[in-house]
Image: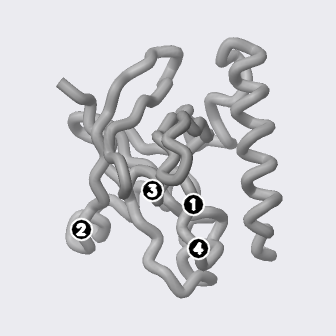
Amino acid sequence: MARLKPGLIRAIGGFHAWLWKLTGGRVGTAFGRAPCMLLTTKGRKTGRPRTTPVLYLEDTGGFVAVASFGGNDAHPAWYLNLQSCPEAEVVVKGERRKVVARTLSREEKAIVWPRVVKMYPNFNAYQQRTKREIPLVKLTTAA
């Protein structure tokens, strides 16, 4: 599988989010068998809200998002934004929730990664073609 250019990935994500919003969530809530959420972060440079569709796995107390960026060697902007400001908002199954993000440790990732790959097998190919360790991000519902 060829690596997609970062600009193309961002354009696809922007179109996906636009389509989701245009249809009120009737289109765009899944990518194949993998569920998709809208994740809104605070831009680390601009401070403005940034919304992107992200595949996720339901997990105890929240969700796990995969910062794969299609297997590119750079982290996705949403992940860098969460490192700067871990408070965010997600829309999952039509429900809006405030969340707090943290990157899973290597040990935690080792436990969750097989579930992530079962949901979306391309994640394994993405990890094999990038030099970086693809982070898994736990999004816990804020109190």
Q: Which of 1 and 49 lies nearest the eye of the viewer?
A: 49
Image coordinates of residue 72 in percent, x first then y, are 64, 74
Q: Amino acid at mark 3?
A: Val
Q: Which of 79 and 63 lies nearest the eye of the viewer?
A: 79
Q: Is residue 8 above or below residue 30?
A: below
Q: How is the image coloured?
A: one colour
| Numbered badge on residue 105 | 2
Q: Which structural element holds mark 1?
A: loop
Residue placed at 66% from the left, 65% from the top?
Answer: 70
Image coordinates of residue 79 in percent, x first then y, are 47, 56
Q: Amino acid at mark 2?
A: Ser
- The residue to which callout 4 is attached is 74
Label 1: how many Cα within 10 Å (few below 14, some 14–19, many 20+): some
Q: Which structural element holds mark 4?
A: loop
State yes or no: discs 1 and 4 in contact (Cβ < 8 Å).
Answer: yes
Residue placed at 80% from the left, 76% from the top?
Answer: 2
